[in-house]
Image (cartoon, rainbow, N blue to C red):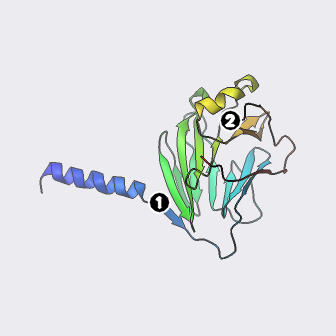
């Protein structure tokens, strides 16, 4: 086999490995159809169709499926599943499946060149963008343009996480009162 053919084969194998979703074990209990996001200090807990994600140090009562740590200057966001930890450089994505629920996590350029994470649940059922850098209040309206298709933004505001529904035209922030969940459901596109 020639070098070009070997290189093409290696490239194809690497591409196929990236495209194959990582499968997580699903529980036997029924899966709720909607989801919640609960701000907790600087982090948040996200629940949707059997998934439990802990963001930026949020500590759930049960073991989370995924632990996400937002990017910092010159450091990529971190994704942890069990004991496995990996960085998500810009424009990289990870596809995951738990039972019949899919989740795709993509690292995108955010404000101030610090990576943001886009969580895409299901077949574009619901999209949440997690921003690592604080955003000025007057720039909230521009987030829907910067992250088209995102339904909710998790923002840093005065040292804690808050939630901003995107695409409604109104700028209303939830989560200033900690531990009150923001409820959402599948969005038809």
Q: Is residue 162 left or right of residue 121?
A: right
Q: Is residue 78 left or right of residue 41?
A: left
The number of discs equals 2
Q: Residue at x 41, y 55 (%)?
A: 19
Mark 1: few, some, or many residues within 10 Å (few <14, many ≥20)? some
Secondary element type, mark 1: loop
- Compared to 96, does 92 lie above or below? above
**Residue with the most extreme right position:** 177
Q: Residue at x 51, y 46 (%)?
A: 88
Q: Quadrant of residue 60?
A: bottom right
Q: Residue at x 59, y 30 (%)?
A: 146
Mark 1 sits on what residue? 21
User: Residue 73 at what x, y percent from top left?
Assistant: 59, 33
User: Residue 58 at what x, y percent from top left?
Assistant: 74, 52
**Residue with the most extreme front position:** 188
Q: Earlier in the sequence, mark 2 or mark 1?
A: 1
Mark 2: few, some, or many residues within 10 Å (few <14, many ≥20)? some
- Compared to 134, does 61 lie above or below? below
């Amino acid at each position: 086999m020639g070098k070009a053919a070997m290189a093409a084969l290696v490239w194809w194998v690497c591409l196929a490995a990236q495209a194959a979703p990582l499968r997580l074990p699903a529980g036997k209990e029924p899966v709720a159809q909607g989801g919640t996001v609960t701000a907790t200090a600087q982090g948040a807990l996200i629940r949707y169709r059997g998934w439990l994600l802990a963001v930026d140090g949020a500590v759930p009562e049960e073991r989370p499926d995924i632990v996400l740590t937002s990017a910092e200057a010159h450091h990529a966001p971190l994704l942890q599943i069990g004991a496995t930890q990996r960085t998500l450089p810009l424009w990289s994505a990870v596809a995951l499946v738990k039972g019949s629920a899919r989740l795709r996590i993509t690292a995108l350029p955010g404000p101030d060149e610090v990576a943001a994470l886009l969580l895409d649940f299901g077949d574009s059922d619901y999209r949440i963008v997690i921003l690592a850098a604080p955003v000025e209040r007057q720039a909230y309206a521009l987030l829907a343009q910067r992250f088209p298709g995102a339904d909710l933004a998790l923002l840093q505001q005065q040292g804690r996480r808050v939630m901003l529904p995107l695409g409604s035209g109104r700028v209303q922030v939830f989560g200033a009162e900690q531990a009150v969940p923001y409820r959402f459901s599948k969005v038809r596109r």
